[in-house]
Amino acid sequence: MTPILETVDLECSFWISTGMFSPKKTLAAVNGVSVQLLKGQVLGLVGESGCGKSTLAKMLLGLQKPTKGNILFDGQPFERLSQFERAARVQPIFQDPYSSLNPRKTIFEIITLPLSVHKVGTSRDWLQKAREMMDLCGLASRYLNSYPSQLSGGQRQRVAIARALVMKPEVVICDEPTSALDVSVQSQILNLLMDLKNELGLTYLLISHNLAVVEHLADRVAVMYFGEIVENEDTEQLFNKPNHEYTKKLLNSVLVPDPSRFARSV
């Protein structure tokens, strides 16, 4: 099966300053990453802060140009697609709904913005589509003319999800989609994402620090460390019998009710 999204030896480096009188040095944020995302799959991407997860996500969204390597979409080079084609086929759901939504736009304007940018349908079509997406994401249509500040955190993230899915993308990159939400609504949003995945046939790249969420939702898990993928296995295999030393330490860093939960992995 041809992966719907694939990276081949992907690299991204930045020049950083080390001092006023020192020469700049190269920082490899992503270093030789090769991963495959199969259609209908949930690939979890885990690793500590600063390991390159968000930089990888930006490259997959076309927001950051790779230094080296290739990104393939359905087996074709990603750079051959226009910016509009990329946005139509790959969409993000960001971490913080407080900052990812324009506070000066109504919920209707936010959800239908992709339709406006891509010039899809008429304004009457947009109203119907906005209502459909809100219903699909568990939002009452009475919020159409509301502003983000009038909604709760969970409702704002539902708006962000509706906006991401309004163009019917094939791949959705979820960058810590629940970490900014109250614990009481995190499970609701995660259940919504999985329901939408099954109903719409979506493929997810799930970036998260929450290993319990990744274990529950992901089909495969890739572990990132200092810009490299050090382990990429089926979820059950990785959590029950990790091979890389960093993966073992990462699993053992989780506070769980049963202290012996990952003891066998050491």
Image (cartoon, rainbow, N blue to C red):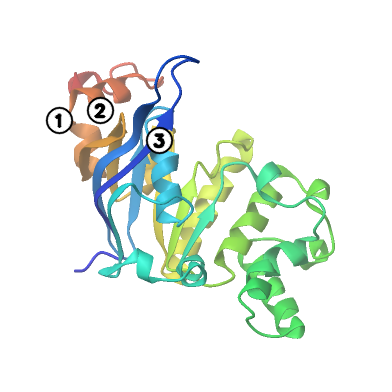
What's the amino acid at mark 3? Phe
Q: Which residue is mark 2?
A: 247
Q: Viewer-nearest of labels 2 and 3?
A: 3
- Can the viewer see residue 140? no
Residue that badge 1 annotates: 243
Query: Is the C-beta separation of discs 1 and 2 under 8 Å?
Result: yes
Dots 1 and 3: beta carbons under 8 Å? no
Q: Are discs 2 and 3 less than 8 Å apart at CB?
A: no
Foreground of the two, 109 or 134: 109
Q: Quadrant of the C terminus?
A: top left
Crowd rating for badge 1 (residues with CA inside 10 Å; few <14, some 14–19, many 20+): some
Where is residue 186? Give x, y as percent: 57, 41
User: Closest to the observer: 214 or 90?
Assistant: 90
Q: Nearer the viewer, mark 1 or mark 3?
A: 3
Kindly identify which residue carries mark 3: 14
Residue at point 46%, 14% (across, down): 21
Question: Residue 184 placed where, x, y %?
Answer: 62, 37
Q: Which comes before the other along the chain, label 2 or label 3?
A: 3
Q: Residues within 10 Å of mark 2 (few under 14, many from 20)?
A: many
- Dot 1: element: loop
